[in-house]
Image: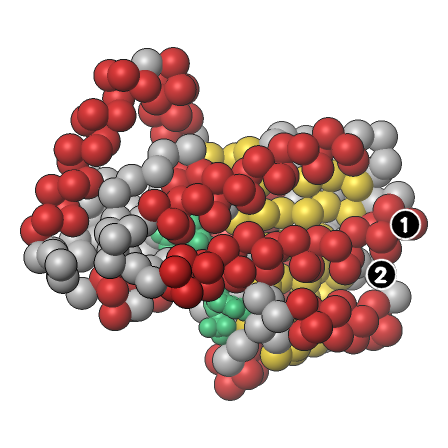
Amino acid sequence: MNFNNKIVVITGASSGIGEESAIRFAKKGAKVVLVARRKEKLLHVEKKILEFTKDTLVCQCDVSNKDQVKKMSEKVLENFGRIDVLVNNAGFVIYGKVNELSIEEIESQMETNYFGMIYSTKNFLPQMLEQKSGHIVNVASVGASFSIPGVASYCATKFAMLGFSEGLKHELHGTGVDLTVVSPIMVRTDLFDHPSFENFTKNATGISLSSETVAKAVVKAANSPRLEIVVPSVVRAGIWAKHTFPFLINPIIGSAFRKQLEKRGSKE
Ligand SMILES: NC(=O)c1ccc[n+]([C@@H]2O[C@H](COP(=O)([O-])OP(=O)(O)OC[C@H]3O[C@@H](n4cnc5c(N)ncnc54)[C@H](OP(=O)(O)O)[C@@H]3O)[C@@H](O)[C@H]2O)c1
């Protein structure tokens, strides 16, 4: 797809993967809408991308709040009259055993990571269907296929996102609108700045990516017929092995990540 003058809405655009994706789309001439809660960070990103594109829009919005997402989508459609790409990227994670996390902490991850994606999708999809064009890119995680100790509730939000995306993609067949999920392994971003990650070894998987690498996959996804792009693609073999031989793979995964969880020291 030629992204020149396309309207690209990115949630979670104030840092990390969202920020890099905004820069990458802007470099391709897209008009980028930056969505997140921290306005000063969004203005900083806007300043960076104004070097490449004239048309941007900053929307301060908490995606877990359905009224705010409705207002944000109305503002976007009033301003531009259409939407070509929606990147549902906003998300966060709280590290800890299920027994340590409060119900509210578990709910809050689902509200942002899963329902935030639902609210944006529900508000922009009718316009895309009317246009008979548009692409939704949902940023999930390898954690949408492997749930590991310490992030069970976070992984559940990404399993939910992948499941919803698969069904919706089938529904969209023949409409001109499409959807692709981007599932990266660990990425070096502020995601791990949450206090619950104190004493966490960031390279536990042995692989970590730059946000530029994932942003490249996000732009590719916006023009891809595939359901899921796993980054790096070699991890696909691991996902296949886990689904095919769970009795062999799950004990290895469980043991490796349990060690990490225990090293951190239990709060119990
Ligand atoms: N880093 C990784 O290892 C990794 C791996 C796989 C998948 N992912 C996924 O990639 C996505 C981006 O994360 P990142 O790694 O780039 O981390 P990040 O740098 O912390 O970025 C997270 C973004 O989400 C926004 N956000 C969080 N809660 C929000 C809310 N309620 N409403 C609106 N915006 C919200 C944040 O902005 P404000 O705080 O300004 O609202 C920020 O812009 C997440 O969905 C994450 O689950 C990350």
Residue 21 coordinates in the image, percent (x, y): 54, 58
Residue drawn 66% across the image and 45% down it: 222
**Left or right of residue 257: residue 122:** right
Q: Which mark is residue 106?
A: none
**Circle 2: is it few (<14), some (14-19), or many (20+) Cα within 10 Å?**
some
Residue 85 coordinates in the image, percent (x, y): 71, 53
Q: Is residue 184 visible?
A: no
Residue 8 occupies which quadrant of the picture? bottom right
Mark 1 or mark 2, earlier in chain: 2
Which residue is outermost to the bottom? 40
| Tag 1–tag 2 contact (CB < 8 Å) | yes
Q: Is residue 11 above or below residue 173?
A: below
Q: Which mark is residue 82?
A: 2
Residue drawn 42% across the image and 33% down it: 145
Given the image, on which type of amino acid does mark 2 rest?
A: Arg
Residue drawn 68% across the image and 59% down it: 119
Secondary structure of the residue carrying tag 1 is helix
* Residue with the mark numbered 1: 131
